[in-house]
Image (tube, rainbow, N blue to C red):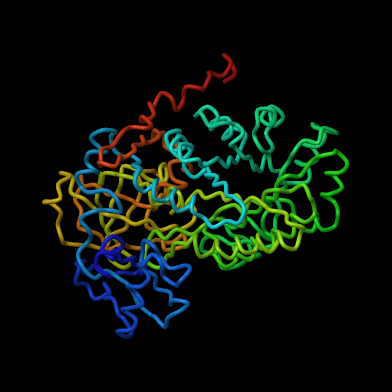
Amino acid sequence: IRKQTSNFGHNIRQDRHLSATPRTSFHPRNLKMRLVSSASVLSLVSTFVTNSSDAFAPRHVLSTRPSQNTAMLATVSKTDAPPETSVFLTPEMAKACIDLAGSPAFAYSLERLQNAADDCLAFPNAYGLTVRYAMKACPNAAILKYFNSRGIHIDASSGFEARRAISAGIPPENISLSSQELPEDFVDLVKMGVKINACSVSQLERFGKAFTGTGQKVGIRVNPGVGSGGFSSSTTGFSKTNVGGPSSSFGIWYELVDDGTVPGIVTEYGLTVERIHTHIGSGSDPEIWQQVATKSLSFCKVWPTVDTLNLGGGYKVGRVEGEVTTDLQKIGAPVADAFRQFSEENGGRQLHLEIEPGTYLVAMSGALVSTIQDKVFTTGAGSHTFLKLDSGMTDVLRPSLYGAIHPMTIFPGSGKTANVGIDTEDVVVVGHCCESGDLMTPKPGEPEDLAERSLRKAEIGDILVMDGSGAYCAGMSAKNYNSFPEAPEVLVDLEGKPHIIRNRQPVEQIYQNEVDAPEGLF
């Protein structure tokens, strides 16, 4: 238990009104782990067994939620000194990344990418499986090329992403495009082999007009009426990571399939529907995902030409204590059974399954390696000690946008394990931007509120590793705000050696496309 909690044992403090009492690892608010009974201990240990009976047990972290199959109740907090390694970086490895690429830098673990790919490629299926990497999670060409080498195809979210994947060497026929904005060059992309899913009625009509009477194959993305994602438990209300239900603009509302609107457009233009696509959100509830997967099969009955059902992605990944990682085998098995039942009830039709993981493939495979460039404090009611990084929302936007929580580990600036200390302190970690919202330690799910972390006591020049930064960080941030250049990226090989896969952006590149206003205008 200690080995597992050490990597994620940084207590999150949510009290905004703190005294100026010196903060140490023995502060009474640093709670200890309480286990209700010895039986609970056995239940806790069992959650780390690969073949656990709990379908949604955490694979990387401890969960404070009771098991569905055991009467477990545990309050988890920091029980020992902070870890000497992060999820995959030692002090020496983190320092090597900085020495090679500079600070801050994103680091990706090839070993963890391999393991995640193995998990997804083993997803249960009845009649064949295609795994598509949601490249928006981390679009670096090296990552795309690695997944391509494993037989993983691409899910693109814009025409530009499709072009980017093609330039990285991805065969166009291995790219599926589901976009809020149908690109102007969609006809060219289709002729190259890119598969397009119509995500609205107007997109389907534009597609039909471009390929009238040709029998051109097309996919239909359906909003199934419910969604799930992020910190929200609602299946119909708005959430920033919920992309299904009446509060979401993603996909064609399912009633327009049922009432004949969509089938009518398909018939009018002589299109061939080959694929149904649904996606309900990022970090979706596994049980809701299963329900939607089964419901999505009903849309396949509308067109006998449909041979593929794409169920999207959004599988939960536990980054910190209390968060869980979805067991793909457990959620996939009932879906495979549903495909078999569909076949039995529909004249032997065997549907091919597609899934589109993004977070699952790369989230815990990446980390942001930063340097603590300043340390300040305030006193009195509501006071805090602040660690200022040389990175921030320009690199990792998730805390500021969603109130997302990332594991954090402090290493000595020397990069030597022998210099790792044991003293801890409660701190607020902030970024380098002149922006009050540049906060790395928000209250969970509340980006407008801050929380403290109990971390190893740090000095200016020390290293902070923010794990869980492989997905929606380098590819989704407030890049170039305050004119900070884009951070470099490195890939850590199986021997622990880093290799640059993106150079640091030259500052001149930030403004190279600017042009002077006409002379005399002002």
On the question of residue 246 being in view, the answer is: no
Q: Nearer the viewer, residue 480 or 503?
A: 503
11 with respect to 476 (left or right): left
Residue 235 horizontal/vertical position (percent): 63, 66
Quadrant in the picture for the C terminus:
top right
Residue closest to the far top: 519
Residue 131 horizontal/vertical position (percent): 54, 47
Q: Please name the residue shown 30% across and 53% down the image.
A: 87
Residue 208 horizontal/vertical position (percent): 81, 37
Residue 433 horizontal/vertical position (percent): 38, 43
Residue 286 lies in quadrant: bottom right
Q: Please name the residue shown 42% across and 37% down the image.
A: 482
Residue closest to the far bottom: 37
Q: Nearer the viewer, residue 444 or 432?
A: 444
Quadrant in the picture for the N terminus:
bottom left
On the question of residue 492 being in view, the answer is: yes
Above/below status of 460 relative to 1: above
Residue 100 lies in quadrant: top left
Residue closest to the far left: 418
Q: Please name the residue shown 45% across and 72% down the image.
A: 54
Instruction: Count the labels in the image.
Output: 0
Above/below status of 201 relative to 301: above
188 with respect to 79 (left or right): right
Q: Nearer the viewer, residue 184 or 23?
A: 184
Q: Please name the residue shown 22% across and 38% down the image.
A: 96
Q: Nearer the viewer, residue 254 or 350?
A: 350
95 with respect to 259 (left or right): left
